[in-house]
Amino acid sequence: MAFIVFSILFIGLLYSHFSLAHMVWTQARGRNSAELDMDYVRIEDYFGQSFRGKVEEWLKLPYEGSRTGAMRVIDRGVEKVIVAGKGMFPEGRRERLAMILEDDFVCGPDCHFERELMVSSNVHVGHGTQLQALACDGSAKLEKGVTVRRWLDVAGPLEMQADCRVISKVCSQHSIYFGPGSETLSLFAPEIETEGRFESLSQSVSEPREVLLIPHAANITEPSHGYDPKLLYSMGGGSYLYNGSLKLTAPLHVRAPLVVKGDVETMEGSMIEADMKVKGCVKIGAMSMIRANLVSDGDMELGQGVFFQRVLHAGGGILLKYGVRGLGQTAVVVYASKMLTVESNVVVRGKLASGDKVKAISSPLAWLKHPAGDI
């Protein structure tokens, strides 16, 4: 009996140390934290949606002074917000207040807007202008050299001319034109394209005389074209490991999930139909087809006219060369831990993102508006 009483007292004393934490956990169970918006990790245009929500709250506040035309000022206490119809700003204009515009926004070159802009219609930003952030419900055009210090969110088509720079995310619900020299951290849209788009570029090549198959046929025992069948091991479940590098002199056809403990270099016209993980760097030959996920720990390069449909992920940098197409049944994703470089005539339906920056560059082939034949 004494032992039972002692045990009860001991457990009660132990629980008293955690009673406060248990009470808080009981109250918070099943609810999202007020400090952490869970939608942030689920949607690409989080910044734009969040700002639009704030604007709705601001418009419910009383405005300051009497209405002058269509313009009024909302006093939020910590700052004031201008609400107007159309915004037309001359060259070199500097504005320190946040603005809500119910019509078009047009500004000349070399303007400077220190706070966020919400535009209900279309936007035209002159060259060299600096913006804090922009949410636009229409289309938007940014002339050469425009800088956005935070994010850019557009409902309609977005045109970013040469040398534009957005520090954070760029999102459009329609399309993004990403001009040469422009850079950002992330792009997301139903369609992203770079300069010199040319749809007649062929996505197919003639049938190769010899193809390296992985897994190989049972009668293949000797090395050929940079592939050694003795280095291929089954890992079970229909997946394989290649214990070395694949630097091939014939097109590759991957038919089962594959891990390569080295570098991979494929020839023109290769086909990757199953997920492939590469411990080194990857270089995919021109006019190849990637129908599965491709992951590398090092750098990745897709040659001219490569077509991919899923996810590209690199621990290093990624280069998408002239004519690359990322067109899948769902949005495709390209992510590089380092720099993601995109040449001319590249089209991706989905997301381009980098831990460093995404940058568009001109290709030597960009001048070929009407090529005489396949490249």
Image (spheres, rainbow, N blue to C red):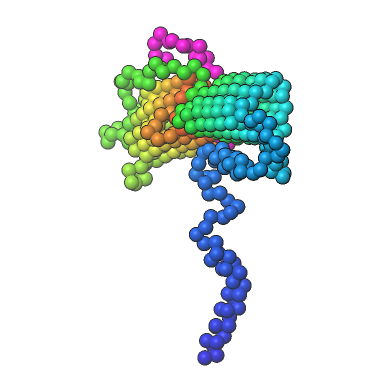
In the rendered image, the vertical position of residue 336 relative to residue 87, given as above or below: below
Image coordinates for residue 64, horizontal then vertical, percent: 70, 39
| Front position in the image: 100 or 108 | 100
Residue projecting furthest to the top: 372
Residue 248 visible within the image: no
Q: How many marks?
A: 0
Residue 49 picture quarter: top right
Q: What predominant SS class does the magenta segment belong to?
A: loop
Image coordinates for residue 366, horizontal then vertical, percent: 50, 15
Which span of residues is magenta-colored?
354-375
Residue 362 visible within the image: yes
The quarter in which the C terminus is drawn is: top left
| Residue 132 sits inside the magenta stretch | no
Residue projecting furthest to the bottom: 1
| Residue 360 sits inside the magenta stretch | yes
- The structure residue drawn at horizontal position 67% and vertical position 40%, both measured from the top left corner, is 63
Image coordinates for residue 361, horizontal then vertical, percent: 56, 21
- The structure residue drawn at horizontal position 40% and vertical position 35%, both measured from the top left corner, is 330
| Front position in the image: 47 or 323 | 47
- The structure residue drawn at horizontal position 58% and vertical position 65%, both measured from the top left corner, is 24
- The structure residue drawn at horizontal position 53% and vertical position 28%, both measured from the top left corner, is 138
Residue 340 picture quarter: top right
| Front position in the image: 335 or 173 | 173
Image coordinates for residue 363, horizontal then vertical, percent: 52, 17
| Front position in the image: 90 or 146 | 90
